[in-house]
Image (cartoon, helix red, strand yellow):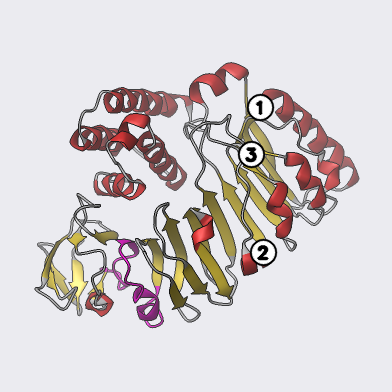
Amino acid sequence: MPLLIDGTPHEDGIFTLQLTSGAPHRLKTSPGQGSLSLGPEKLLKTADLRLPVDACVLWHCFDPFATPAGSPWPRSFYYTGNDHGFFTWAQLRPIENFSWYPQLQQDVHIDASQSQIRELSIHLQAGHQGHIHLKLPQQGMHLHLQGNLEQITVTAGLPESLSLSPATSKNPADKAFQLPDMGSLKQVGTLELRNGAGKQAVSLQNLLQFSKLDSLSLWGNHSDLAQLSSCTQLRTLSLRFMRHLSELPALQVWPQLDSFIAYNVEEAAGKRLRQQLKERTKSRPWADYTSVSQLRKPEWWTKEYGRPFAGWAAARARIAHAAYDLAEQEIGAASSLAHVQAALTTFTARFNTVKGIETSEREDLGLAVQQLAQLPAALALKLTHEQAGQWFDQNRDY
């Protein structure tokens, strides 16, 4: 369906807009495109709109754009640059998702307390000197922080939920990563702590700084799980893609626990957890969803740990693993970023012919692309998280 500008459909998907104070920009969209990427050509080879990293962006130029259903377009932004005026713009124009990749070399103070951004992701990269001091709304925003967590301080406001993906090394033998002091964010009640497959463990020693935590989701490699015994107020606990659970306390440690999920966990621990679920049901029925599924033997962790297709139906999983294997092989032999792009594009497009891709499966495929982007050959060719995400969005019909 064509986009609308001031209520008028534009069939060709080509637009001229005053993105900066300089010459107008030309934007070409494709049918069904819901996201927009913009940033410097040096960092974003395939951006929808290219502009210098320090350019002043006239965000209001997007005001006339709408979907055929009448909602603001774009729904999602991927912006690499230092103009934080979108927070002011979002006071009047709601934004569903905004992913910001700042390249700051100096400190900034941002008041986003009135911004209507539902999902805000900030990707903090090592090597940038600037520190972000950020005021958030009092409610309604979901905040995702990735990378160098010490580069940001939330000075006011509190997100509805907080997701942390700290930058960890690719060597699981490295000393466990310690979470920094998260300041006012320590008051959140819902926390997701994500780590990559097979990466340096994230220690839970500093988890106790979140004194009001009642919902916790852990992904990937973590250590010091015995610390969870002090989080006695937990009502929801989720463990996903976790190989090392020997230190996990028994479920009875959390008397208020209403929901528990363990998905893709080591087999021995999974069997213990299933028995504990049954025992707890005898004394107090579970008030919400509980499940212990996809128990994994040692050989699975060795070969397939971290691939997000583990929960797929067998036939679809075979397609996904075959496509993943091919992409992994091609990226390993790549001699240029174009070769990596071709491999990720082929992987993404392979599923355009697979009928009925669900939302969760689309998210799994996006995660697979990011995992492939972390292969040593891709990193050596300077592939970024953002580039991989853009190639995925641009080449999928699901």
Q: Please name the amino acid that badge 2 sits on.
A: Lys
Badge 1: how crowded within 10 Å, few (<14), some, or many (20+)? many
Q: Marks 3 and 1, how far apart in space?
A: 13 Å
**Which residue is denoted by mark 1 in the rendering?**
266
Range drawn in magenta:
67-94
Please determine whether, in this image, residue 126 is positioned above or below residue 248.
below
The residue shown at (68%, 24%) is 267
Q: Secondary structure at mark 1?
A: strand
Left or right? Give the position of 325 relative to 66. right
Q: Dots 2 and 1: beta carbons under 8 Å?
A: no
Left or right? Give the position of 259 relative to 299. right
- The tag on residue 222 is 3
Q: Please name the amino acid that badge 1 sits on.
A: Glu
Q: Is residue 322 visible?
A: yes
Q: Quadrant of residue 58?
A: bottom left
- The tag on residue 186 is 2
Q: Please name the amino acid that badge 3 sits on.
A: His
Residue 183 vs residue 288, the one in the foreground = 183
The residue shown at (20%, 49%) is 45
Q: Earlier in the sequence, mark 2 or mark 1?
A: 2
Q: Secondary structure at mark 3?
A: strand
Q: Quadrant of the N terminus?
A: bottom left
Q: Secondary structure at mark 2?
A: helix
Q: Earlier in the sequence, mark 2 or mark 3?
A: 2
Residue 42 place in picture, x, y as percent: 20, 52
Q: Quadrant of residue 105?
A: bottom left
Residue 351 place in picture, x, y as percent: 31, 36
Nearer the observer, disc 3 or disc 1? 3
